[in-house]
Amino acid sequence: MDVFEAMGTCRAMRHLTPDPVPEELIDRVMWAATRAPSPGNTQGWDFVVVTDQARRAAIGAAVREAMGDRVSRMTHHDRTSRLMLEGTQNLIDTLGAAPVIILVCGPVIYPYDAPREQFTWSALYPAAQNILLAARALGLGTVFTSLFRAAEPAIRAELGIPEEIRIAALIPMGWPAREFGPVNRQPVERFVHRDGWEGVKRHHGPPL
Ligand SMILES: Cc1cc2nc3c(=O)[nH]c(=O)nc-3n(C[C@H](O)[C@H](O)[C@H](O)COP(=O)(O)O)c2cc1C
């Protein structure tokens, strides 16, 4: 699969089978993560890759306890948001059974003489996207989540992640239990401004 097909079909996969992911594939995904660009090529990232069953279960239980059925009780504006919220609730309910849970983390180290947190996120988000695309290319499903925020102290304690290390994403990874397919995005022309801002036809906001 080429990179364009991977980008065009890399849907958030919130339903995963519990089947294990071979170590070789995990290694390839983490190779991709560590090939990402970062400010000053600092490579200021750490990835906690959790396959241990007890630890995955503990993370899943912590998130489930913190989130409860909050998401499934949210208002469903349309079919797309209903499917997304149902998927997110499923993810919360089954997170501990995801065969791999990746925490994308990193220190605040750049610029070295006056480190600023914004540069930490600048390193971690491209690395997270590389994880998503590499997994998709290998047939594995992932979803970028901020679910760790609901239970951050418990997750930090379970995995021993130090206080000074920032966490950017919790990414469950496994074999998809739903179909991949084209991502639902607005036309390119709505976002691309050629040679200047003129001709912009819409303001940012919810999809029209
Ligand atoms: C920064 C960020 C945070 C996200 N957090 C969550 C989350 O906590 N839970 C979740 O189910 N999806 C989360 N997502 C996934 C988005 O909901 C998803 O990418 C978006 O709805 C588009 O869906 P698609 O990727 O299937 O096309 C997050 C995505 C990003 C980029």
Image (spheres, rainbow, N blue to C red):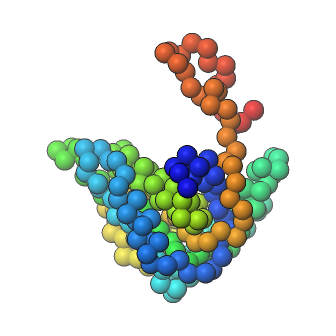
Does residue 22 appear left or right of residue 82 in this picture?
left
Name the residue: 55% across, 21% down.
Answer: 193
- The front one of 113 and 30 is 30
Please identify the quarter of the rendering in which residue 179 is found: bottom right
Q: Residue furthest left?
A: 113
Please identify the quarter of the rendering in which residue 200 is found: top right
Name the residue: 41% across, 54% down.
Answer: 127
Relative to 45, is 193 above or below? above
Relative to 159, is 191 above or below? above
Name the residue: 32% across, 47% down.
Answer: 38
Rendered-image quadrant of the C terminus: top right
Relative to 128, is 25 above or below? below
Q: Residue furthest bottom?
A: 54
How far across and how far down the image is residue 54, in percent? 51, 87
- The front one of 139 and 145 is 139
Relative to 142, is 78 above or below? above
How far across and how far down the image is residue 85, in percent? 73, 58
- The front one of 115 and 97 is 97
Q: Is residue 96 visible?
A: no
